[in-house]
Image (spheres, rainbow, N blue to C red):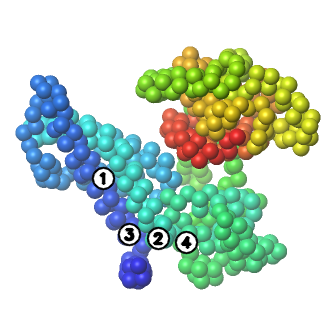
Amino acid sequence: MIVLCRVYNILMKIFKGNIILIIILMFADLFSFYLSLFLAYEIRYILFYLLPGKLVPMSFPFSSFIKMWWMPTITIVLIWATNLYTKRLPFWIEASNLIKILTLNSVLIFAMVSLGKLLDEVSRGVLILFWLISLFLFPLIRLAVKLTLFNFDFFKERILFLGAGKTAKDSASGLISDKYLGYHLVGFLDDDREKWGNLLEICGKNYKVFGGIVHFKKFVKKLSISTIIIAIPSLDAQSSSKLVGKVQLLVNKVIVVPDFKGVALLNSELLTLFDQRLFLISIKNNLKSKINQIIKRLFDLALCLAASWLIIPIIIIIALLIKRDSKGPVFFIQERVGKHGKPFKCIKFRSMVLNSDEVLNDYLNKYPEKKLEWQKFKKIKGFDPRVTKFGRFLRKTSLDELPQIFNVIKGEMSLVGPRPYLFSEVYEMQDYKETIFLTVPGITGLWQISGRSELNFNERLNIDVWYILNWSVWLDLEILFKTFSAVIKREGAY
C-alpha cells in the first residue's frame, strides 16, 4: 500500500490528477460497453433456444464487434461532450445524464448499422438488449470505480470554504456526506475574528477556521487547494463578483453557494445574456403540466401492476397475522386530505388497539412531557401504548402503509408524493396547503427519506412543497430507491 501511494504521488506530480481520473473513467466506460454488449449477445443466443422458430439464428461471432471500433468511440465522445468525465455530480444526477446519453448513443448506433447495411453482422435484438443492459451497467460500474478510488483518497478535490456560517456548514455537510463527489474538506476562512482557530464539526469530524478571507491567497498555496467554495449569503452582488474574480486566478474551480435555500431549482435552466453580461434562472413547475400529471399516473400504474404478484400475497399474510394478534378489523380506514383539498379514505393496516383515542388521552395526561412531544411531532417517540405488538413491527418496517397501493390504483394517491395530511392539520398548514394540494399524496415521499418522524410539522411542510415544485419522474425513482434503504435501516421510524 505504501509503494502504491508513492507511485500515485509521483504520477500526480507529473500529470494533473484530473487527467488520470479521466483516463480511468474512460476505461471503466469501455469495460461497461463491452460487458453490456457481451451480455446482450449471450442473452440473445439463449433466447434463440428458449423460443425455437421465433428468432433468426445469429450468423456472426461476438468477436466481430471488436472490429466495429466506431461503436464505443461514439459512446465515449457523447459522454465527453456532456462533460461527464470532468464534472463532479451526485450519483443520481450523473446516472440520469448517462441514461439520456446511452439512449441517444443506441439510436445513433442503430441508425448507422441500418444505413451501413450491417444488419447481417449485427442483430437488432442484440442492440436493443445492449441498450437496456447499459442503462444499469454504466452507472453501477462508475459508482464502484469512483467509490473505490475516493475511499482510498485518490483523486479527491481539496476544497476550502470562504465563510464559516450556517450556509457554509450546511453546504460542507452536504458535499462531504456524498462520497460519490470525492471532495476533501480542508477547512474554512471567515472574517469574524472570534471564529479564527475554532473547530467546526462537519459529519462527525472537526475542521479548522484558519483565518480571515482576505488571506485566502496564502492559504490556497499553503494548503494545496484546488477548489474554493464561496458561502457568504450576506455578501452583496458587487462584492461577490469581485471576490469570485480574484479567486478564479488561483484555483481550478470556484463554487458559489447562492442564498436560494428552499427555491425550486431542480428543474431550472440557466439563460445567459451575453450583451448585458447577465444570467437568468428559468424555473419550471413540472406538475402544473397535464402531460406530466398523466406521465406520473402511468408511472404509478405500471409499477403497481409489475409488483402486484409480490404485494398481494404479502397483504394476505399480514392480514391473517393481524387477526391473530389482536381483536378488531384488519384495515384502518381514515379520512385524509387529497388533491385540491378533497377528502378520500386512506387505507392502512390496523396497528393500534380499538380504543386508541382513550388510551392516548390517558397516557398524555399521565406524562406531560409526552404531551409536548405530541404537539410538536404529532407522534410519540419510543413506546406508544396504543400500538399492538404486531403493529410495532408493521410500523418499524412501514408495512402498515402497504394497503395504500389500492388508493394508488384508484388514483387517490401516488407511489411518491407529499404526506397524506389529516383535516385537523389543514389549519396549521397555512399558505403551504395551496402548493401541497396541487397533487395527490404519496405512500412515500421526500419526507420519508429525510428523517420521517424525526422531522417537526413545519419541516415536513417545507419538504413536501420542495418536492412538488421540483418534481420529475427521475426524482420519484430516486425517492423510491432511497425509501427501501431508509426502511431497512429503520431511519426515523417508531
Badge 1 local density, few (<14 within 10 Å), some, or many (20+)?
many
Numbered disc 4: secondary structure = strand
| Residue at 54% in and 52% down | 274
Numbered disc 1: secondary structure = helix
The answer to whether residue 251 of the structure is visible from this angle is no
Amino acid tagged 3: Ile
Upstream in sequence: badge 3 or badge 1: 3
Q: Which of the labelled discs sits on residue 158, or is there none?
A: 4
Upstream in sequence: badge 4 or badge 1: 1
Report the side of 140 relative to 340 (left or right).
Answer: left
Residue carrying label 3: 19
Percent across and percent down for residue 117 are 11, 37
Quarter where residue 239 is shown: bottom right
Marks 2 and 4, Cα distance to the nearest angstrom? 14 Å
Q: Are marks 2 and 4 in contact (CB under 8 Å)?
A: no
Residue carrying label 1: 32
| Residue at 68% in and 44% down | 492
